[in-house]
Image (cartoon, helix red, strand yellow):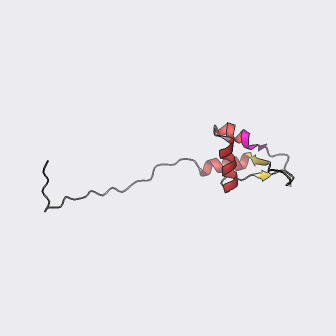
Amino acid sequence: MQVASARYLTPPAVAERLAVDPHRVLGWIRRGELHAVNVGDGEMRPRYRVSEADLQIFLAARSAGPAPKIARVRRRRDQHVEEFF
């Protein structure tokens, strides 16, 4: 297993890159939306690191595509109703 070739980012670095709050990045990690590795020793709070590859996968999954077409149905007027204005 070769880890030295991959570049890992801290949650604040990811937040800076995406122009969001670091707490939002931590929320994505906790919910499992963004894969991260805990490099902490387990005695204190977690120290997450996000690989460049995982960040790219996360961004690709959240990228906007073409808007889905919405079928619009025209409602017909009821022939037995008279409208007065």
Quadrant where the image shows the N terminus: bottom right
Q: Magenta segment range?
A: 4-12
The residue depicted at 80 percent of the width and 48 percent of the height is 47
Image location of residue 48, percent across then percent down: 77, 49
Total tally of numbered discs in the picture: 0
**Relative side of 42 to 76, left or right:** right
Image location of residue 32, percent across then percent down: 68, 56
The foreground one among 73 and 78 is 78
Q: Would you say residue 5 sits in the magenta stretch?
A: yes
**Relative side of 19 to 12, left or right:** left
- Looking at the image, residue 16 lies above or below residue 49: above
Image location of residue 36, percent across then percent down: 74, 52
**Relative side of 22 to 73, left or right:** right
The residue depicted at 66 percent of the width and 56 percent of the height is 31
| Figure quadrant of residue 11 | top right
**Relative side of 82 to 20, left or right:** left
Q: Would you say residue 37 sits in the magenta stretch?
A: no
Image location of residue 69, percent across then percent down: 41, 53
Q: Residue furthest front?
A: 44
The residue depicted at 76 percent of the width and 43 percent of the height is 10
The residue depicted at 70 percent of the width and 41 percent of the height is 14
